[in-house]
Image (cartoon, rainbow, N blue to C red):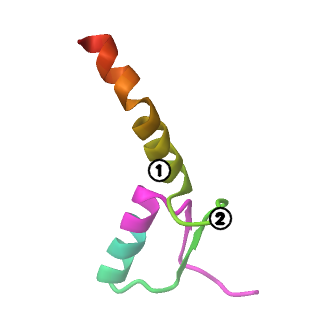
Amino acid sequence: MNAELDVIIIEAGFCGITIAASLKNFGINNFIVIEKGETVATIWKKCLRTISYSKSLFYSTFL
């Protein structure tokens, strides 16, 4: 691929997707979002699973 891009967004997490949506709203369509994970928001999903598994431990330390 030898295309010239206006913007390259690295990572398709919360911020990357928000930036992509903002660019679209401003009429900028010549961009690409690069994500090293197998899906969008990979790190967020992993963190959410970790928080879900350790929620009872987290709450018990403050009770």
Give SS at disc 2: loop
Decide if residue 23 is on the left or right side of residue 3.
left
* Residue type pointed to by label 2: Glu
Depth check: give the residue in front, 12 or 6. Answer: 12
* Residue type pointed to by label 1: Trp
Residue 28 locus on image (x, y percent): 41, 83
Pick whichever of labels 1 and 2 is earlier in the sequence.
2
Judging by the rendered image, the residue that carries numbered circle 1 is 44
Count of numbered circles on the image:
2
Depth check: give the residue in front, 5 or 54. Answer: 54
Numbered circle sitting on residue 4: none
Identify the residue at image location x=36%, y=26%: 56
Residue 41 locus on image (x, y percent): 50, 59
Judging by the rendered image, the residue that carries numbered circle 2 is 38
Identify the residue at image location x=36%, y=65%: 18
Does residue 1 appear anywhere in the picture?
yes
Task: Identify the image quadrant of residue 58.
Answer: top left
Query: How crowded is the residue under tag 2: few (<14 C-alpha within 10 Å), some, or many (20+)?
Result: few
In the rendered image, the residue lying farthest to the left is 63
Q: Are marks 1 and 2 in contact (CB under 8 Å)?
A: no
Task: Identify the image quadrant of residue 48.
Answer: top left
Depth check: give the residue in front, 7 or 46. Answer: 46
Residue 38 locus on image (x, y percent): 65, 64
Q: CA distance from mark 1 to mark 2?
A: 13 Å
Image: magenta residue range: 1-18
Image quarter hosting the N terminus: bottom right
Decide if residue 26 is on the left or right side of residue 11.
left
Image quarter hosting the C terminus: top left
Q: Is residue 17 magenta?
A: yes
Residue 22 locus on image (x, y percent): 33, 72
Does residue 26 appear anywhere in the picture?
no
